[in-house]
Amino acid sequence: MSDSRNKLLIVSIQNSALIVAAALLTITSLKSSALSVTGQPLNYRVEGIEWKTLPDAVAAAQSSQKKIMVDVFTDWCFWCKKMDTSVYGDMEVQKYLADHFELVKLNAESESKHIFRDGNYSERQIAGAFEVDGYPTTLFLSSDAQMITAVPGYLEPKTFLAVLEFIHDEHYKSMSWQDFSRKKGIEQQ
């Protein structure tokens, strides 16, 4: 090989090593930023929101007659964290949720067990039973824990508020989401 080709190959290898190092540093930094000082995922700590376990939310919904909203997440999911800060951190969203829903955080990769319906299931199994296959996914359940719908992906606060209204006021029984969102002036994401 010529001397100039050797230098070019060495520079190329060095650049590749820098890219790999930067990617590893980014992943490490994202992982550590996803944990609080106690080692618990920050997803559980959205100030202003009282998250419950699924069994606790079902019990509360039976007396309050509120619907249940389940935020299905994973610790590594960027959009889940954005949902926590941008959407669940929004004061208007927080007020609407507190007034109209029982709230659950469900880690789709957790082996933590909960008594739900007819058995003792892990959060992973519960997410699977609701056919969740992407994160975040927001599940909406009736007060007796029957599935209303699942909304996959991240939504901006304004759109999320419209979804909450659509579910809470039971517009889903008389019109499509497309008709409702068009009526509300919400752009499709």
Image (cartoon, rainbow, N blue to C red):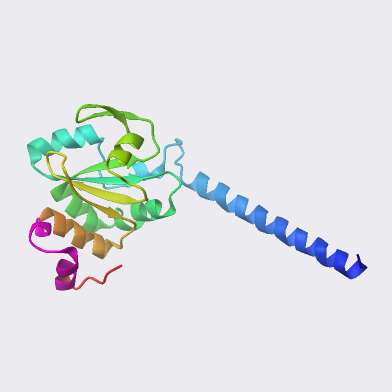
128 relative to 154, above or below: above
The residue segment tinted magenta is: 170-183
Q: Quadrant of residue 142?
A: top left
Does residue 102 show up magenta in the picture? Answer: no
Q: Quadrant of residue 169?
A: bottom left
Is 99 left or right of 31, judged from the image as shown? Answer: left
Q: Position of residue 41 (x, y in %)?
A: 41, 41
**Front-most of 144 and 95?**
144
Q: Residue at 28% across / 57% down in the picture? A: 90
Q: Main secondary structure of the magenta part?
A: helix
In what quadrant of the picture does the C terminus appear? bottom left
167 relative to 122, above or below: below
**Front-most of 108 and 97?**
108
Q: Residue at 23% across / 56% down in the picture? A: 93
112 relative to 178, above or below: above
Does residue 181 show up magenta in the picture? Answer: yes
Q: Position of residue 51 (x, y in %)?
A: 26, 41
Is 148 left or right of 125, judged from the image as shown? Answer: left
Question: For the image shown, how many numbered marks are present on the structure?
Answer: 0
Q: Residue at 34% across / 56% down in the picture? A: 153
Q: Quadrant of residue 130?
A: top left
Is 10 left or right of 46, judged from the image as shown? Answer: right
Q: Position of residue 29 (x, y in %)?
A: 55, 49
In what quadrant of the picture does the N terminus appear? bottom right
Q: Position of residue 134 (x, y in %)?
A: 37, 50
